[in-house]
Each structure stands twice: as structure tokens, then as C-alpha cells.
Image (cartoon, rainbow, N blue to C red):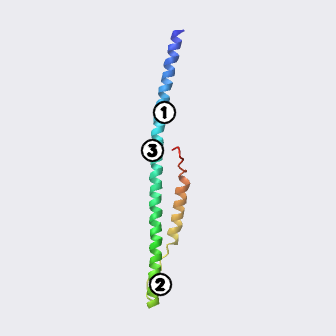
Amino acid sequence: MWDRVESLEKKLQVEVDKRIESEKVQGKLQRQVDELKRERLFTLSRYIHLKLRIEEAKREIEYLKSKLREKDPEFDKDYPNFSVESDSLSDEHLIDEIIRDTPPISEGS
């Protein structure tokens, strides 16, 4: 009878040790996932900030061009017209993809 009890205690201790090790590994992996989420969100916020600065610069350029047109209506007729619509569309797809792939960070994480 005592041999069975000791055997069960050993098995129980082994299972407890496995569980503790598993929880340590899960905790480590969760910290790595959280860090990756923070890095991704930081990168996204930098990207958005830069996009906003670019849009601000575009508005400033258009303002300056309009001022130049007041003095010389044809000052830019020899310059090619560039379009950034396709870039903006791909940017929107990228942001949507990042938002879709990034689950919300809960308060408990």
C-alpha cells in the first residue's frame, strides 16, 4: 500500500513539475508576443505620423504652387504631373492588414 502511495506521490510531483515548466514557457512566449505587438504598433504609429507629415507637406506644396500660379499661371506647365493615388491605396491596404492581424491588447496582458 505504501509503495502505491509513494508511486502516486512521485507521479504527482512529476506532473506538477511539468505543469510549472509549461507555465514558465507559456509566460515567456506571451511576453515575446506582447513585445512583438508593441513593436508592431510602434512601427504603425511611426508610419501614420510620417504619412500625416507627408500630407501636410503636400498641402504646403499646393499652397506654394497656387501662390506661384498667381504670379505666373504657366510656371509648372512643363513639369510632369505625379499621382500618389496608388501609393495611398496601397497604404490603406497595409494599415487595414496590420489592424486586422493585430488583436486588441487587453488590460490584463
Rounded to the nearest whole Å, what is the CA distance between mark 3 and mark 1? 15 Å
Check disc 1: other Cα within 10 Å, few if <14, some if 14-19, many if 20+.
Answer: few
**Residue 32, disc:** 3
* Lower position in the chain sequence, tag 3 or tag 1: 1
Q: Which residue does the image show at 54% across and 62% down from the upper left?
A: 93
x, y (%) of residue 102? Answer: 53, 52
Left or right of residue 1, residue 57 in this image: left
The disc labelled 3 sits on which kind of residue? Answer: Gln
**Residue 22, disc:** 1
| Quadrant assignment, res 64 | bottom left
**Comparing labels 1 and 2, the label whose residue is closer to the camera:** 2
* Lower position in the chain sequence, tag 2 or tag 3: 3
Q: Is residue 58 above or below residue 3?
A: below
The answer to whether residue 76 shows anywhere in this view is no
- Helix, strand or loop status at disc 1: helix
x, y (%) of residue 36? Answer: 45, 49
The disc labelled 1 sits on which kind of residue? Answer: Ser
